[in-house]
Image: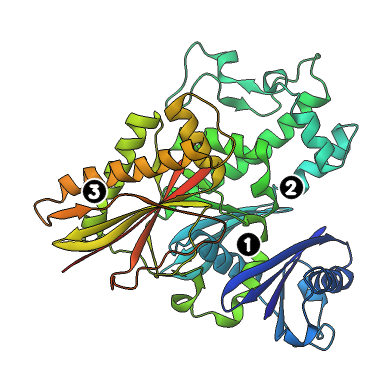
Amino acid sequence: MIIGIDIGTTTTKAVSIEDGTLTQKIKTKAFDAVTAATGAFGKMILENKIKIEDVEEILITGAGASKIDSNIFGIPTSRVSEIEAIGIGGMFLSGMNEIIITNIGTGTVIVETGSRGIVHFGGSGVGGGTILGLAKGLLPVSEFTDIMELAKTGNISQTDLLLEDIMDTGMSFLDREATAANFGKMLDTSGPGDIALAIINMVYQVIGVLSVFAARARNTREVIVTGNGSDNIIGQKILSKISIMYNTEFIYPEHAEYTTAIGAGLYNIKNLKNLKKNGIIINDSPKKGTKMDKTIKPFIDVCKNVFKELVGTTLHEGRPYFVESGAVAEGDISAIIGLTGEARGAVVISMKTDVAAKITDKLTGTSHGGLDDDVVDAIGEIVNIISGNVKKSLENDFRLVISLPSIVQGQNHIIRWPGIQARFIRIPFKIFNNSTFYLSVAIESV
């Protein structure tokens, strides 16, 4: 077992890694680096009943790592560059290789990964520390949770100069609600809630636009958002507006706030081609223009059309990646269709309970709170319709027979296909703003 620790200026996060898989995570608060590191390690050991002799190595990173120059509790302890930790953690959590990662902490770091390796692209001194510092000077509160509560009551038009204040129309790709100048209005009627919202708005607009420019410089329209600031609901809404404005997607992977600690913990197995996250092989996805890439395109197109027509929502697909048979499914429910005939394989759709329930709500017009019979039937019918439509589009290549849908439920469930040699391609789809479900496909000639 490897322990990765990210020692921040105020918050320290620790994770345990076993065989390239994230197993546990915790966070603590301390301002002294040694106290933070030993406290996080102790909390990890005690809360998860880990035997200290099972820990092979501790890998530390973050602002406070430079202050620790000896082993922790006699366990071999090494420092990892924060840039490399962010890069490795970002690739691991996103399942992507060539990406831009925006890590929002006290300040903001932008990291590029890909053919040039892991590179510090740039960043800004604007981040969570900016919010806290300005709040301390401008607001009656200084705790982050209190600032967020105040901001929920705010009205940005009280503080910011908007285009609608100075123009009758929008400008270029900007609509009339776009910001012309942060804090450029500051009406006498503006209150603490308005100012709190304006501070957060300014910080996330700066971060968002810098991230967009970084993505464009590397010819991508996806940004992986990590760090403590990735979990800020108001910040996510601000980035969502920038996403629409600049046609760039901000992706928030699960466990994003632990990215740097995870990257540190994985550093001792830095061969990224063999690094696995529940079966994901980093650096490995279908190459553009190949037969495999062309084979999965109908599945992507059909899936988007089915959800548009049946659910009335637009999907945004992420980058496909390979997973091995037996990989943990991404969700609480999976609907499976078997393929036979001139080719064989399977189509699997997996999602979390809340996503499945919301999809069923849209289909039935009634509310569902869990995986009841209606939800199970709905998800099975969707994968059935997708498979049937793809079958028609592939008739020139294969004559396929599709099975009735099967359903598997439960956290961390595994789907195995012993008779299929082809690897599964997993395609993430964004739905309902920041929710994600996954379509997995394996198909091979017989």
**Residue on which the image places disc 3:** 298
Q: Residue at x 73, y 85 (%)?
A: 54
Mark 2: which secondary structure?
A: helix
Give the percent coordinates (x, y) of residue 269.
Answer: 56, 81
| Furthest residue in direction top, as rendered | 168
Above or below, comparing residue 395 to residue 36 in the picture: above
Q: Amino acid at mark 1?
A: Thr
How are the colours assigned in the image? rainbow
Neighbor class of circle 2 (other Cα within 10 Å; few <14, some 14-19, many 20+) is many
Q: Front-most of 23 and 110?
A: 23
Please report whichever mark, 2 or 3, sits nearer to the chain's N-terminal start.
2
Above or below, comparing residue 409 to residue 420 in the picture: above
Q: Front-most of 239 and 278?
A: 278
Q: Amino acid at mark 3?
A: Pro
Mark 3: which secondary structure?
A: helix
Res. 245 in view: yes
